[in-house]
Amino acid sequence: MEVFFQMRFSYCGKPEGLMTRASNSSRAFNEADILRQFDVLERLTLPSLRDQDDPSFRLVMLSSARMPDECKDHLTWLLNHYLPGRSEVLYSRPMVPGRVFRRYMQGLGRGDAPVIQTQVLDGEAFGKRFVQRLREHGIESWATGPTGEGRSATGGTFISFKRGLNLRIERKKLTALEPTTAPSVPFGLSLVARPSSRYNPTLINADGLGVKFPHVSIRSQGLHCLRAISGESAKVMPAIEQRILDQAINEFNILRAPHDIRVSEDRAQPQPTDVNGVVRLRRAG
């Protein structure tokens, strides 16, 4: 089952699909913003994809046709350096990103064979076993989902990871890390479907997962997704437990660099549930 990472790289202050007539010009170029995007792309996202245990995937990036040539050249150099032969850039006029990705996938002509499409947000990185775990869950989801006409009607199944990590970066230094669950935008949001599916991870409202769209939430304790955050929520991040930091460093090579992440003592783990006892109580009731 092929895996396609889909990422939007915007060189303007406003998302391409939200441009107004006044801002729809080259003067909308924001140098500080694009330098920040290049920085997190090179420090977090691309190294994490390069370090995957399972290298069988492709990164498809979307950017504006108005991007300056020097930025296009640098983006091409980065992709060829980190993911040679496994990446490409789509340059498009302003339009809804999800529609561009959907048109790209539908043009692959893979027939009935399912693929996995994964949304990559700005500042995201993935643990070295992410592709391996994603493919395992994708194969299981496809095998246990609807068949025949029922499968065609659903358009596929979405998968996301409930647990992940938030990362704070200050002045290009890693300063805080915390585990989190159920963020507003799910970690590793992916779609398992035929390339011809009308769905796309970047074309839906995440609030509809499990309601409007079939959805499987992966609740494992593994830390496979990381997201750099900023603003008020980043200022109050507490010290992380040493065991969790060790687990994160083992999964994300990008965290092995010198950092200023504060740690606390490990808290006692909850006692495992006695499953046999639970079963007995249910039978007794």
Image (cartoon, grey):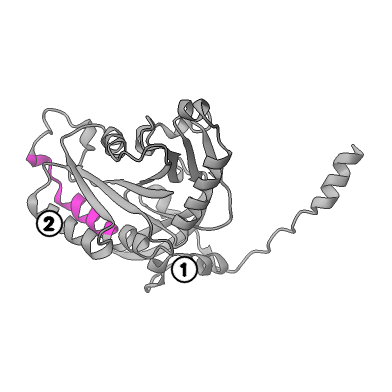
Q: Position of residue 103 (x, y in %)?
A: 27, 34
Q: Position of residue 255 (x, y in %)?
A: 41, 67
Please name the residue shown 48% across and 69% down the image: 250
- The disc placed on residue 73 is 2
Q: Quadrant of the C terminus?
A: top right
Type of residue at label 2?
Asp
Please name the residue shown 9% across and 55% down the image: 70
User: Would you say 103 lies left or right of 231 here?
Assistant: left
For the residue pair 116 and 254, the one nearer the viewer reads as 116
For residue 102, above or below residue 220 = above
For the residue pair 174 and 147, the one nearer the viewer reads as 147
Q: Secondary structure at mark 1?
A: helix
Q: Residues within 10 Å of mark 1 (few under 14, many from 20)?
A: some
Judge whether residue 225 is colored magenta: no
Q: What separation in Å lies between label 2 and label 1 (alpha carbons)? A: 32 Å
Type of residue at label 1?
Ile
Magenta stretch, overall SS:
helix
Q: Position of residue 265 (x, y in %)?
A: 59, 69
* For marks 2 and 1 on the same chain, the one whose residue lies earlier in the sequence: 2
Magenta stretch, residue numbers: 26-41
Q: Nearer the viewer, mark 2 or mark 1?
A: 2
Determine the image quadrant of residue 79.
bottom left
User: Dot 1 corresponds to which residue?
Assistant: 249
